[in-house]
Amino acid sequence: MRRSRRWLAKLPKSRKDLGSLSRWWLVAGVLAAVLLAAAMAWLLDRVSEAVDPTWERIQETGVLLVCTDPSWPPFESIDEVTGQLQGFDVDLAGLLASRLVTGGRPDGVQAKLVTVGFDSLYDALLSGRCDVVLSALPYEAMRTEDVTYSLAYFNGGLVIVVPEESLDIVEVEDLAGRVVGVEWGFVPEGDSRQRLFFQNLGLRRYETAEGALRALQAAEVEAVVVDRISALTYLRDCQGLRIVGEPIVDVSYVIPLRPENFRLIEEVNRVLLELLEEGALEELQRIWF
């Protein structure tokens, strides 16, 4: 009871006391709002002061430097007739650069391709020879200490390919009890359940993914599991086969950037999302596969 009485004794005893209390809370609220606004202004000021030097240079010069290894068609290669770089990644580099926010530059931003050997792509990026790398590179978690990856722009993972008339294979589980062709170096991937499933299949191995696909056309096997790039490349010239559903294992192709280039990273991801939503990435796939 003693605690209750003390609490009651602190209650305002008149309308005057209530008015004073209300004014005190009003003043305290206004003061808190002012302090919050000041803190937000300080934070925004600090953010606005942060500078991405690479982004600033791109804005000034109108040039996005893109490293690529032109030895992996159809993503990047050198045209034997013209000597010019061509491919999925080459076209994507042009689209990407053209859509970067230019800050009023009438001629926008252009992609300048820098050819680099595959083993030196990451070194070239980190040493500043280029701003981004577009060279059919898969996401590698171990490299995220040194680089930042963009959103995925292509999935080159494992897919199931079946004869066009086949209707009873629509997912991985439907491969049970069937003769399935794979490339010689095939290693079961995915979660533990999926790896065990593949280990228990009677796989028929071929020297290459193309060899497995030819075996499927010759009806030596009922389905094949190969990487999506091999499947798309083969299907471009050969009829009678089709890919079933989405990749059963993802291999995301991404664009490496330097972590400190926060503004460029933001812009690259924004453009990739736009291209995905507009169907431009799918159109590039139709052109090059």
Image (cartoon, grey):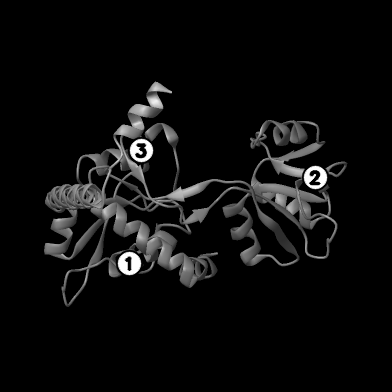
For image coordinates 37% across by 34% down, the residue present is: 143
**Dot 1 alpha-carbon crowd within 10 angstroms: few under 14, some 14 to 19, many 20 or more:** some
CA distance for labels 1 and 3:
24 Å
Disc 1 vs disc 3: which is toward the camera? 1
Q: Secondary structure at mark 1?
A: helix
State how many labels appear: 3
**Dot 2 alpha-carbon crowd within 10 angstroms: few under 14, some 14 to 19, many 20 or more:** few
Residue 67 image offset from top left, x and y in percent: 29, 51
For image coordinates 19% across by 49% down, the residue present is: 20
Residue 94 is labelled as 1
Disc 2 vs disc 3: which is toward the camera? 2
The mark that comes first in sequence, 1 or 2, is 1
CA distance for labels 2 and 3:
38 Å
Q: Residue furthest top?
A: 2
Closer to the camera in the image, 31 or 8: 8
Left or right of 221, for residue 89? left
Residue 173 is labelled as 2
Q: Residue furthest bottom?
A: 106
